Image: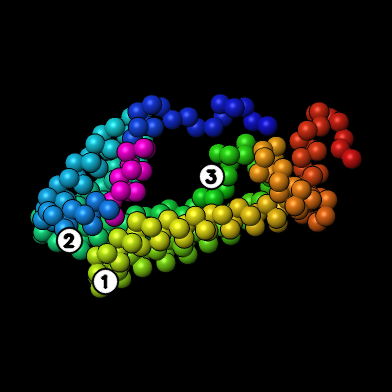
Amino acid sequence: MGAPDARPQLTPWQLVAAILQGAFYLAYPFVIYFAHTRWATRGVGGVLLGLYAAAFLLGMRGSAVDLWHLLRQHAAVAVLIVVAIVLDDRTLLLLLPMLVSLYLLGTFSWSLYNGPSMIERFARMVEDDLPPFTFSYCRRVTWVWCGFMAFNAVTIGALALSAPLRWWALYTGLVFYLLMGLLVGAEFCFRKWWFRYYGSGPVDRLFARLFPAEATANGRRSLAYVEQRAAPPGEPTR
């Protein structure tokens, strides 16, 4: 197993910035829906721009490379909000979640050609010593997420341009997260069933009871890998 400090650690400032950004995206559909029933587009855009600027300023830590990466992440969103304020166009504010999905689609897609894949990178944050036989699977799951982000971007665009505001708010504020949770849960269960590579946590113990690793070739491969990792250096495994 790798050293515990091998995983990236967030500073308190970065953690606060991440929480603010997460809250911004989670609350965005509801803010838009309720604010548009009371305020003009420019007032809504001003509030959103202020919240987003606060999250950005809190995230301005680290090297020049980190700052440039942060600017690239935030520039398009900030420009879209500013243009919406200038043009007094509500539709542009409704397209912001689509822009986020397109950004994620581009990031995930780029990782497929400039590996490792994005899902493999996420998996390495959880599993220090990721089994090599999972790499191709991580690529396939990355493709699935690319398809999901493309579907989400198209759906949000269609709702923003041609549907009532409440439909857009319902999808972006609830349905999207339900679909994402369903995808995450289905992939997790399939992965456990397919590889049967279990840890020591209670969920893994439950899966190990339901789907014994010894019952499939993939499971026996996972058991052999765990045994190989646990063996002292130089000692042959069975």
Q: Nearer the viewer, residue 136 or 51?
A: 51
Classed neighbour count for the residue bearing mark 3: other residues with Cα under 10 Å, few (<14), some (14–19), many (≥20): few
Q: Which mark is nearer the camera, 2 or 3?
A: 2
Outermost residue, bottom side: 162
Magenta range: 18-29
Task: Quickly name the residue at label 3.
Answer: 122
Element assignment for label 3: helix
Q: Nearer the viewer, residue 29 or 72?
A: 29
Q: Amino acid at mark 3?
A: Phe
Q: Amino acid at mark 1?
A: Ala
Give the Cα separation between the discs numbered 2 and 3: 35 Å
Q: Residue at x 45, y 58 (%)?
A: 178
Task: Quickly name the residue at label 2.
Answer: 90
Q: Amino acid at mark 2?
A: Arg
Q: Is residue 56 above or below residue 152?
A: above
**x, y (%) of residue 15?**
39, 32
Give the Cα separation between the discs numbered 3 and 1: 35 Å
Q: Residue at x 71, y 46 (%)?
A: 206
Give the Cα separation between the discs numbered 1 and 2: 13 Å
Q: Is residue 62 above or below residue 215?
A: above
Q: Which mark is nearer the camera, 3 or 1?
A: 1
Element assignment for label 2: helix
Q: Which mark is nearer the camera, 1 or 2?
A: 1
Task: Quickly name the residue at label 1.
Answer: 163
**x, y (%) of residue 201?**
67, 38
Tell me where residue 94 sits by quadrant: bottom left
Dot placed on the residue nearer the N-terminal end, 3 or 1: 3
**x, y (%) of residue 215?**
83, 55
